[in-house]
Image (cartoon, helix red, strand yellow):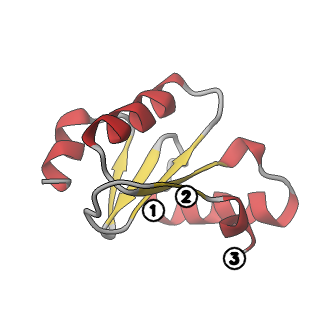
Amino acid sequence: MEYEKYVKHVSGNKKGDIILFALSTCGWCRMTKNFLNQLGVDYKYVDVDLLEGKARDEADKEVSRWNPSESFPTIVINKKCIVGFQEDELKRLLK
């Protein structure tokens, strides 16, 4: 997919496949990134609002597939979706 060229990787302890769909201007998205960093987990993220054209369309479609309300942050952890900054749910899924 086109948007995957813009996905950034943060190294850490591998807890499965984690991708964060975020907005560069979203405080909750920043809190989610910071929390994942504090946990020291390996994850990928993309700031959807910084994408253009086909990459943006594909990323929007992927977010919608996991989260029909298309709100941010949308975090997919091992094929389970968390919408919003939910610290307890993130901890539970990343044990």
Q: How many marks?
A: 3
In the image, 15 versus 63, the foreground residue is 15
The amino acid at mark 3 is: Met
Q: Work out whether mark 3 precedes mark 2 in sequence or the reverse, and give the earlier one.
A: 3
Disc 3: which residue: 1
- Which residue is situated farthest in the bottom direction here? 1
The structure residue drawn at horizontal position 69% and vertical position 76%, both measured from the top left corner, is 1
- Which residue is situated farthest in the top direction here? 27
Q: Are marks 1 and 2 in contact (CB under 8 Å)?
A: yes
| Left or right of 7 on screen, residue 34 | left
Q: Quadrant of the C terminus?
A: bottom left
* 95, above or below 88, in the image: below
Q: Position of residue 13 (x, y in %)?
A: 28, 57
Give the crowd class for mark 1: few <14, some 14-19, many >=20 residues within 10 Å: some
Residue 63, labelled with which disc? Answer: 2
Marks 1 and 2, how far apart at CA: 5 Å
SS of the residue under disc 1: helix
* 88, above or below 7, in the image: above
Q: Position of residue 36 (x, y in %)?
A: 34, 41
Marks 3 and 2, how far apart at CA: 13 Å
The structure residue drawn at horizontal position 84% and vertical position 53%, both measured from the top left corner, is 52
Give the crowd class for mark 2: few <14, some 14-19, many >=20 residues within 10 Å: many
| Left or right of 22 on screen, residue 55 | right
Q: Position of residue 28 (x, y in %)?
A: 46, 27
Disc 1: which residue: 66
The structure residue drawn at horizontal position 67% and vertical position 48%, both measured from the top left corner, is 48
Marks 3 and 1, how far apart at CA: 16 Å
| Left or right of 40 on screen, residue 19 | right
The amino acid at mark 1 is: Trp
The amino acid at mark 2 is: Val
* 76, above or below 92, in the image: below
